[in-house]
Image (tube, rainbow, N blue to C red):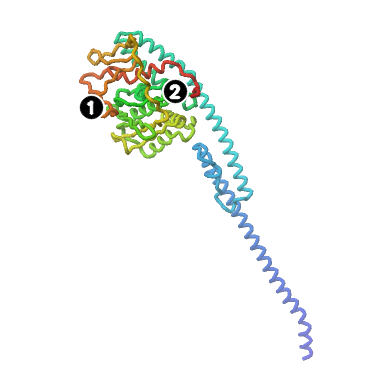
Amino acid sequence: MTLIHDLALLALPGGVAAGGAAVYFARSSARHRKDADAANRRAKKAEQAAAARDEEAMHLVQSRLPAVVFALQQGTGNPVATYGAALHQALVGTTTDRAFQNVLEQVAAALSEAAARSEGAARVAAQATTKSLQPLGYELQAAITKLLDAEHDPKTLGLVQPIDHAASQMARRLQIIGVLTGTWPGRVRDDVPLLDALRGGVSRIRDYPRVQVPAGVPFHVAGRFVEPLVLMLAELLDNAARHSSPKTPVEVSVLEAHNAVSIEIHDAGPGMTSEVLHEARRRVSGAEPVQFTGLGTPAAFGLLGVGVLAAKYGFRVSLDLEHSRHGGARAVVQVPRTMLVPAPAPQPEPAQQPAAPHRAPAAGPSGEQQRYEVGADGLPLRRRPAAGPPWGPEPAPAAPTAAPPPPRAGHALAAFVQGTRSASVPPPNEEPNP
């Protein structure tokens, strides 16, 4: 027993040591596994962060930068704040997010500066072009007017009058471009009857024979607002005529309201889609500045010019499809009563009435002359019809049985005689103080 006991005692320290080593190695292995797991988690997290930054970089290039560029082109608010949101919220506020935001802001600033330079250059070029061409246009109209006043041969007049009308349209296009660049649309006129302003607008469009104006309108327009109103009406009438069949009328009527007089223009065109109507209303509202670099091809100036004039002088222009009399579109120009003046008092007739300026009438379809009376101011004398509402549209001219009459034949000449005459004097480039 002693031997066995001694051997057991001798073997005990080795067993204890072996057990302690086993425990030590087990604990060490657990720590290594724990450290390895932590290292793996850190590596995985780093990989996820790197992948998120890569995805954020791709989002910056593919989405955020194009969105900012588009927003700058459309002029919709702060493009960086609107379209600068990060893809991964975990990166918000990090160095990567701040760096990408800085890139967006620098790109937006550079593009805004470039766009401003381009817009300024385009505006200056348009203004310089109109200022150089307008005097030539007025000289042309003055020469044509002088020829029409001096010539009495019907054949010669029939050849010259279409040139006169084309020159009037060219002057109108130059005027509307000048309006978009910020120049005064024309010279200050005397107070005129509203009917003369309507006829002046009709005189400046190609399809003037299709326009039916009221027979009588008992209102007068203050001189400062005459030229802007004439130009607005011309653009709206031209738009109505160009977007409707040449066989259909363009009807103008005048409605008296409490605070304004409304001029309505009805066409018989196909109407507009909701998108086109929305864009047209945006243009005539004048609420947004005109961007020459965003006009598109071909550039459309007319409705933009209407919007600029409306915003500057206080007219109100609206477009709709629901109230058109002929299924097309209706344009309404509201003239505030502050722009209207009382009719001038009748002047006593002089002892000897001066002779009215004479212009030979144009020949009709079969060679006969059209008879119409012309007053001292160059406007045809219209007679009130025996029946019917005083402000209703004039009846459409009867359809010819033979070939259509030549341009400006008959009373159709009445629509633009005053307009072409009044445009013969070169206007100043800037609006005088009222």
Please tell me which residue lies in front, 421 or 214: 214
Q: Quadrant of residue 272?
A: top left
Residue 235 vertical position relative to residue 17 in the rendered view, above or below: above
Q: Position of residue 120 (x, y in %)?
A: 54, 28
Count the marks: 2
Mark 1 near mark 2, Cβ–Cβ under 8 Å?
no
Query: Residue 211, can we see it?
Result: no
In the structure shown, which secondary structural element does the residue marked by tag 2 occupy?
helix
Q: Secondary structure at mark 1?
A: loop
Nearer-the-camera pick, 18 or 206 = 206
User: Can see residue 258?
Assistant: yes
Residue drawn where x is 46% and y is 35% of the image: 287
Residue 175 has which mark? 2
**Quarter that holds the N terminus:** bottom right
Q: Amino acid at mark 2?
A: Gln
Q: Nearer the viewer, residue 237 or 19?
A: 237
Is 379 drawn above or below residue 53 in the view shown?
above
Type of amino acid at the residue the image marks with label 1: Ala
The image quarter containing residue 212 is top left
Q: Nearer the viewer, mark 1 or mark 2?
A: 1
13 up-or-down from 183: above or below: below
**Of callouts 1 and 2, the N-terminal one:** 2
| Residue 6 at x, y percent in the picture | 79, 86
Which residue has dot 1 on it? 387
Q: Where residue 325 sits: x, y (%)?
A: 29, 34
Percent position (x, y) of residue 144?
A: 38, 12
Q: Residues within 10 Å of mark 1 (few under 14, many from 20)?
A: few
**Callout 2: few (<14), some (14-19), or many (20+) C-alpha neighbours within 10 Å?**
many
Residue at the image position 64 percent from the left and 58 percent from the top: 42
**Separation of disc 1 and disc 2 at Cα?**
39 Å
